[in-house]
Amino acid sequence: MIKILAIIMLVGGAIALVMGVLGIFGSIALMLSPWALAILGFIFFIAGISMLKYRKDTDEVAADHRKH
């Protein structure tokens, strides 16, 4: 479950980051502030990467508890 959430955050953050950067440089017109979109995209992208790297999935935690 945690890995699914991390992948969603990673993909959503990457999309928001790209759209924000394109909005900052004027390549795309957005309804939102491009700076806010780029900053939020960066935060979600980094959070998704760190969750994929360091968190055990809930299935793995449940399996560890069953072994003991």
Image (spheres, grey):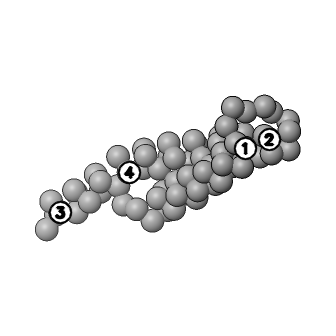
Task: Identify residue for label 2.
Answer: 22
Task: Identify residue for label 4.
Answer: 2
Residue closer to the observer: 22 or 11: 22
Local packing at callout 2 (Cα closer than 10 Å; few below 14, some 14-19, many 20+) is some
Estimate the x, y position of residue 56 in percent, counting from the top left: 36, 60
Q: Are marks 4 and 2 in contact (CB under 8 Å)?
A: no
Q: Amino acid at mark 4?
A: Ile
Residue closer to the observer: 26 or 49: 26
Of marks 4 and 2, the one in the foreground: 2
Local packing at callout 4 (Cα closer than 10 Å; few below 14, some 14-19, many 20+) is some
First along the sequence among labels 4 and 2:
4
Q: Is residue 45 visible?
A: no
Q: Using the numbered discs, state the Cα–Cα distance from disc 4 to disc 1 in whole angstroms.
A: 29 Å
Q: Is residue 12 above or below residue 55?
A: above
Estimate the x, y position of residue 36 in percent, counting from the top left: 66, 48
Estimate the x, y position of residue 17 in percent, counting from the top left: 68, 47
First along the sequence among labels 4 and 1:
4
Q: Which numbered marker is on residue 65?
A: 3
Snapshot quadrant of residue 55: bottom left
What residue sits 35% from the left and 46% below the top?
1
What residue sits 66% from the left and 45% below the top?
37
